[in-house]
């Protein structure tokens, strides 16, 4: 099997010749710039993401951006101007990954809701597949390019537009105004899902990063389940797999996640970092693929500790397939060879022993 074939076999719910080991391609490039994939022969498979949509506003909305500084001092200030008011975001960037860190969100008070609602009411989404075609051709059999759309509306509003504290205030104290805002974004998002269904991508990514620490089961059922139900229906009809990023504490949401038709729970992070074991996830979600994130807290441990946890994870995953181990977060790049050598050795030894 090629690396891509192995991964897609597992993502489709089957059992491959061995358990895939994955890493986001941008993490590998940041860790080893220009050096390629030194663990390709050991099965390290690349995961990339390419957007499928392009949002456009009508000419009643103006978006102005100003960039200042460089490196760790780089800052981008974005202003959205509408006939009903203006909102502003200030963001910094991690120079290692170019990761965006929002220091000031667009929505700060309830008065800002109407501005963002106007923005979404005057926004459309259109297909934009060229980046996917280019990335997929470049990737070849070394891994997989996933079709990227924004996180579902509740996650996007929480993480990108409001920030966690303001979002919590919104759903507790300003539910009517918040629900109207989310409804406007949901209209745009449903169009994005339709575009993804028509796209060349085999796997479509919900990049949620939701956690049961913040989102309760009742909020999940109110704000997450309806859009998952809508998206899964049209994506499944188009033959797509759905790939959802759940890297937080999932134990309180296990029954909620069981009740939505998501194919792959990606970045699932087991103890000692998060609160739900692989064994418990297997029991709760027997039909879903677990594509786990190897906990970053273990990267600094001795090789024997990393190997022990790797074997424990594979033991809990069982022998029926539908399981991959991956790296989905930043880490100390000086530990790259140490960590991936230990994981690879343990996976090889475990799989040889199990045959």
Image (cartoon, grey):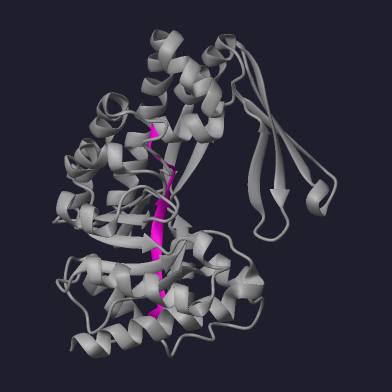
Residue at image x 40%, y 49%? Answer: 274
- The spot of residue 214 in percent (x, y) is 42, 31
Q: Which residues are magenta?
A: 140-153
Instruction: Residue 137: tell me if it is visible.
Output: no
Please name whichever residue, 152 or 39, is drawn nearer the observer in this view of the structure: 39
Q: Residue at x 69, y 61 (%)?
A: 96
Query: Is 333 in front, or is 159?
Result: 333
Whether 29 is among the magenta residues is no
**Quadrant (top left/top right/bottom left/bottom right) for the C terminus:** bottom left
- Asked if the magenta segment contains residue 147, the reply would be yes
The correct choice, above or below, for 218 with respect to 318 in the image is above
Q: Is residue 27 above or below residue 197?
A: below
Q: Residue at x 41, y 43 (%)?
A: 208
In the image: residue 13, left or right of residue 54: left
Query: How far from the left and from the top, in percent, is residue 25?
Result: 52, 69
Residue 199, by quadrant, is bottom left
Q: Quadrant of the N terminus?
A: bottom left
Q: Residue 125, can we see it?
A: yes
Q: Position of residue 64 (x, y in %)?
A: 71, 32
């Amino acid at each position: 099997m090629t690396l891509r074939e192995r991964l897609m076999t597992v993502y489709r719910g089957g059992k491959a010749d061995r358990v895939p080991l994955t890493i986001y391609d941008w993490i590998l490039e940041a860790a080893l710039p220009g050096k390629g994939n030194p663990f390709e022969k050991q099965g390290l498979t690349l995961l990339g993401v390419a957007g499928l949509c392009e949002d456009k506003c009508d000419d009643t909305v103006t978006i102005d951006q100003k960039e200042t500084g460089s490196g760790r001092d780089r800052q981008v200030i974005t202003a959205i101007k509408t006939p009903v008011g203006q909102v502003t975001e200030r963001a910094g960037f991690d120079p290692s990954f170019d990761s965006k860190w929002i220091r000031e969100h667009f929505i700060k008070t309830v008065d800002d809701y109407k501005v963002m609602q106007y923005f979404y009411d005057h926004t459309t989404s259109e297909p934009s597949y060229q980046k996917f075609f280019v990335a997929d051709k470049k990737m070849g059999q070394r891994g997989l390019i996933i079709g990227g759309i924004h996180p579902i509306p509740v996650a996007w509003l929480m993480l990108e537009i409001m920030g966690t504290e303001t979002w919590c205030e919104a759903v507790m104290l300003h539910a009517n105004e918040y629900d109207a805002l989310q409804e406007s974004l949901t209209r745009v998002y449903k169009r994005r899902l339709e575009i993804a269904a028509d796209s060349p991508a085999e796997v479509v990514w919900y990049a949620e990063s939701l956690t049961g620490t913040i989102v309760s089961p009742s909020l999940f059922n109110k704000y997450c389940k309806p859009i998952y139900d809508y998206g899964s229906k049209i994506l499944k009809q188009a033959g797509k797999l759905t790939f959802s990023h759940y890297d937080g504490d999932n134990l309180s949401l296990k029954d909620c996640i069981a009740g939505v038709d998501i194919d792959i729970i990606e970045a699932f992070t087991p103890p000692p970092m998060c609160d739900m074991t692989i064994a418990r996830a297997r029991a709760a979600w027997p039909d879903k693929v677990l594509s786990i994130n190897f906990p970053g807290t273990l990267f600094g441990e001795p090789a024997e500790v990393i190997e022990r946890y790797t074997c424990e994870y594979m033991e809990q995953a069982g022998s029926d397939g539908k399981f991959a181990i991956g790296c989905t977060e930043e880490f100390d790049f000086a530990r790259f060879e140490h960590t991936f050598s230990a994981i690879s050795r343990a996976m090889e030894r475990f799989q040889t022993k199990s045959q």
